[in-house]
Amino acid sequence: MNQPQIVVISYNTPHRKTQDVLFQLKAKGYEKVTVLALPFVQRENPFKPIYAHRPSTAIQVETNLLCERLSYGFETVTADEIHPYLEKHPTDFILIAGAGLLPDELVENHKLINSHPGWLPKVRGLDSLKWAIHNKQPLGVTCHFVDSEADAGFLIDQKMVPIYSNDTFHSVAYRQYEIEIDMLVNSIEIIPTRKDFPSLSTTEFEATRRMPKAIEQTILEEFEAYRNEFTQD
């Protein structure tokens, strides 16, 4: 196997998405992997949704120790230190497994790969799954190179999330999450086969914010109607 150099941007605390990405990279045989771990800032009043739809329970193993056990590299960095690091350490693929807003200098000079739980450019921003259901938009996942515009950049791959007649809101949410992880890791194989990466920049669709609880409280009922309309079996 031709071993590419892979960087995974994440947090310096146990983090479910990071763990799932690292496990899948290891399972696929990738060995030259380094995690650049950003400090995780706990908000004083973190947002608590009525219905959590993202898997959040991580194995309580610190990221540096997990990397050691997987024989992966590990560096603690600030967001401003990632660009200089990448300049000194040429990398083939840079996967975002967890990060807030990243500096423009970093985004504009490196091809950062993100997997967004929404069908871009129609479903942008936070709580994409819930807003897609509420607005009767397609449920999908978009893998893309990021740029300074929120949930835009350049398309790598897109997949619809199938909906079945026996689905619940939470079963669909978990299926979307699994596709998100798969597409992020699979981008390493897909990118070399593509010559064209269409722009996802748009002024037609605005990025959403957290769903207000006044709307969220009816999302399970809205999902029932959504499932009946979009089921594929």
Image (cartoon, rainbow, N blue to C red):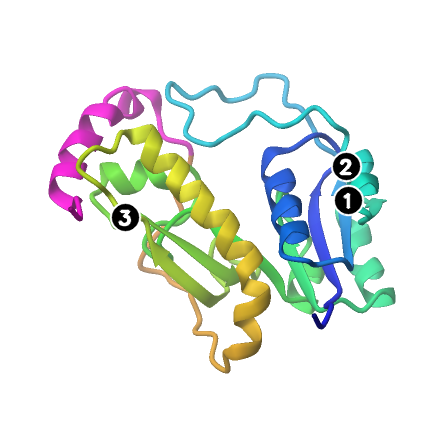
Q: Quadrant of residue 78?
A: top right
Please check the rendered image and state whether residue 213 is part of the magenta-colored stretch, yes or no.
Answer: yes
Please give the range of residues in magenta.
Answer: 210-233
Residue to which mark 3 is pinned: 162
- Counting the numbered discs, the total is 3
Please check the rendered image and state whether residue 37 is part of the magenta-colored stretch, yes or no.
Answer: no
The residue that appears at 69% across and 53% down in the rendered structure is 103
Q: Is residue 158 left or right of residue 42?
A: left
**Label located before the other in sequence (2 or 3):** 2
Residue to which mark 1 is pinned: 70
For the residue pair 233 and 196, the one nearer the viewer reads as 233
Q: Establish if 146 lies above or below 71.
A: below
Rounded to the nearest whole Å, what is the CA distance between mark 2 and mark 3? Answer: 33 Å
Residue 45, x across and y down, in percent: 57, 17
Q: Establish if 91 lies above or below 16.
A: below
User: Quick check: marks 2 and 1 in contact, CB under 8 Å?
Assistant: yes
Rounded to the nearest whole Å, what is the CA distance between mark 2 and mark 1? Answer: 6 Å
Mark closer to the observer (3, 1):
1
Q: Quadrant of residue 106?
A: bottom right
Q: Is residue 195 left or right of residue 70?
A: left
The amino acid on which the numbered mark 3 sits, given as a three-letter code, is Pro
The residue that appears at 37% across and 22% down in the rendered structure is 51
Q: Is residue 207 visible?
A: yes
Residue 166, x across and y down, in percent: 20, 33
Residue to which mark 2 is pinned: 66
**Which class describes the residues within 10 Å of circle 2: few (<14), some (14-19), or many (20+)?**
some
Residue 27, x across and y down, in percent: 64, 51
Q: Quadrant of the N terminus?
A: bottom right
Q: Main secondary structure of the magenta part?
A: helix
